[in-house]
Image (spheres, rainbow, N blue to C red):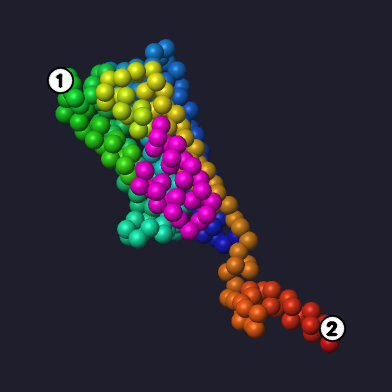
Amino acid sequence: MPPHRRLDAVVAMLAVASLVAGAVVIGDARAMYERFLYISELGAQYMHSAGQFQIGFGLVVAGILLVAVVVRDVRTRLPVLRRWAPAASLVVAGALFGFAAAVPCSPGCPTLLGPEAELRDWAHIVAAVLAFAAGCTAMLQFATADDRWVARLSIVGGLAVGIIAATGGLLSLTGGNTDVGSTLEFVAAGIGVLWLIAVAVVHSVPVNRADASAPPVRRAGGAVPAGAAALRLGGELARD
């Protein structure tokens, strides 16, 4: 394995460890309460879980940035979205999620449609929404990437996260069923973390590209890999 691939494997392991640790810390913070809460409420002002939530979310953000390092060479086939790397979208999403965690919402995390909303609520929610949009953009870019396994994972993960998170978000904005909305938000977040872990692991797994990377040799019947041509030539010389 080339040195840079070994380094990517190490970074991928760190990313997985950071994402798993962050999810565990946030899950433990959620277990402090018997009632249903949205993710942002765990870090809201004056909540007992706020400090622990910020640590957990910080670990998740670090994991996102590490995954971006691992997949820095992935490119999409879409004309517009290939102007920047999908890893850049992950970096933007991670930075915005970090800002949203650093600027928690006010107690109860009121919706922006209500009179209780403060300036910090606007900053928190706008950052979180933009982070989610950047994450969805990254998923779309990975879903149309040259790496077929990363693309397949991203199609499944993107559809699941998009549908579940959109439903939960609409319930949150309209003040609908908090139990269902908060549960859907946690499910979508969990799928997102699993997607990041899967992409980092799959992309960093070494594969044998000897034949695929060798220059093709032209012959009457078409192009064959140089490695296969050399083996065939060696067999013919041995027979002679």
Number of other residues with Cα within 10 Å of mark 2, as a class: few under 14, some 14 to 19, many 20 or more: few
Residue 88 in the image: x percent, y percent?
Answer: 35, 52
Quadrant in the rendering for residue 31: top left
Residue 161 is tagged as none
Quadrant in the rendering for residue 185: top left
Q: Nearer the viewer, residue 96 or 14?
A: 96
Q: Which residue is mark 1?
A: 115
Q: Is residue 94 left or right of residue 150?
A: left
Q: Give amino acid for label 2.
A: Arg
Question: Residue 137 magenta-drawn?
Answer: yes
**Distance CA(mark 2)–CA(mark 1):** 88 Å
Residue 67 in the image: x percent, y percent?
Answer: 45, 47
Q: Is residue 31 above or below residue 10?
A: above
Q: Residue most toward the top? A: 34
Q: Which residue is mark 2?
A: 239
Magenta stretch prevailing secondary structure:
helix
